[in-house]
Image: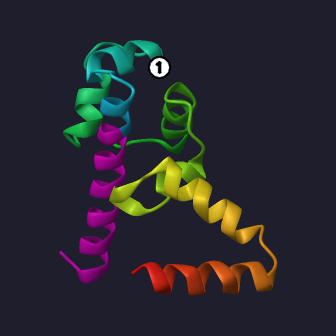
Amino acid sequence: MRANQSVNKNKYDDVLNRMGYFMNKANLSARQTSFRLGFGEQFMKRILNKSVELKVSTLLDFLDLVEITPQDFFYLGKEYNKEDKNMLDMFNNLSTEGKETIVNLMKQIK
């Protein structure tokens, strides 16, 4: 396997792992997810086992099902945390002075 193929395989595995994470977070089994996406009961299991390749359209339907955006799906890698994302959004909306104040405060609290 070429180096690029190995990297892409790891990224694909990460996508599948994130799907599993969000299925668990939504209390959905692979079977329930398959049905809610309009497929047979083994559909998600075949995707997660890599016997069927995930289509982008299926991923987008999945994101709608678990009520997250594509940005949220890929945000913070394996450590997705909505509270962290909200904090980052608030931080990004601050003025330059406000950001400096927060950074200095965080350094003091450390």
Please state the extent of the stretch shown in magenta in the rendering. 1-21
Q: Residue at x 58, y 30 (%)?
A: 64
On screen, residue 51 versus residue 18, left or right, reads: left
| Few, some or many residues within 10 Å of mark 1 (<14, 14–19, 20+) | some
Check if residue 17 falls in the magenta segment: yes
Using the image as rendered, state which of residue 80 and residue 31 is in the foreground: 80
Numbered circles on residues, count: 1
Check if residue 50 falls in the magenta segment: no
Using the image as rendered, state which of residue 87 and residue 102 is in the foreground: 102
* Residue 41 image offset from top left, x and y in percent: 29, 13
* Residue 28 image offset from top left, x and y in percent: 33, 21
**In the rendered image of this protein, does residue 20 appear above or below residue 38?**
below
The answer to which image quadrant residue 30 occupies is top left
The answer to which image quadrant residue 99 occupies is bottom right
On screen, residue 85 versus residue 100, left or right, reads: left
On screen, residue 24 versus residue 59, left or right, reads: left
Using the image as rendered, state which of residue 48 and residue 100 is in the foreground: 100
Q: Residue at x 37, y 21 (%)?
A: 33
Q: Residue at x 27, y 21 (%)?
A: 29
Query: What's under tag 1, amino acid-wise?
Result: Leu
Secondary structure type for disc 1:
loop
Check disc 1 and report the residue beneath it.
37
Magenta-drawn stretch, dominant element (helix, strand or loop): helix
